[in-house]
Amino acid sequence: MKTLCLYYTRTNTTKEVMETIAKTIGADIAEYTDGKNRNGFWGYVGACFATVNNAIPKVSIKGDIDLKAYERVIIGMPVWAEAPCAIGRALIKKYRNDMPAEVYYVVTHMGEKRDYAAKIKAMDSILGRPSSGQVSIRTKENDYIKESKAFAESLV
């Protein structure tokens, strides 16, 4: 199944998770962005503000990517302010009509293992249909690479 892994990352952790998933299943990979530098403390504050206020005016996928060429897309994004990042939600909103039948969400977070299922599932309303699945991966003091591989292997 031709698969594309998309990711947004502020600290490269989500990138590492998505690279692991892509490598495990032999998928293509691409980054999406809102074009803003969100590094450092103030970058994080701005990211949280954007998530709480759902304030992302633009988002794009880097490279020459045709979503319609894929049968499955896996979208990786961090959790900011206890919700999937606004940049990930903006991506889904902008490209929802181009997404293939199978769409999965991967959210990464540093907090305790919480049940983000309801918040992740809420992205289905942005997509306009049910996603094929989702996973929440805790990255702090956890073997998140092992979790990433396990998720990827569940898709094979």
Image (cartoon, rainbow, N blue to C red):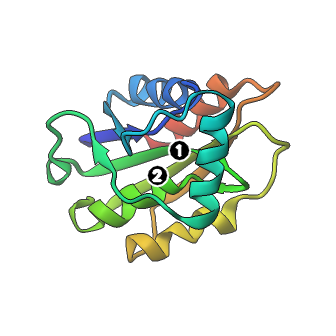
Q: Nearer the viewer, residue 4 or 41?
A: 41
Secondary structure under badge 2? helix
The extreme front residue here reads 42
Residue 52 sits above or below residue 48 on the image? below
Residue 115 sits above or below residue 121 on the image? above
At a point 49% along the width and 24% down the height, the residue shown is 20
Q: Quadrant of residue 44?
A: top right
Image quadrant holding the C terminus, namely: top left
Secondary structure under badge 1? strand
Residue 134 sits above or below residue 11 on the image? below
Residue 69 in the figure: left or right of residue 118 = left
In the rendered image, residue 53, in percent from the top left (x then y), is placed at 59, 66
Residue type pointed to by label 2: Ile
At a point 26% along the width and 43% down the height, the residue shown is 1
Residue to which mark 2 is pinned: 87
In the rendered image, residue 5, in percent from the top left (x then y), is placed at 37, 38
Report the disc number at residue 77. 1
At a point 37% along the width and 55% down the height, the residue shown is 91
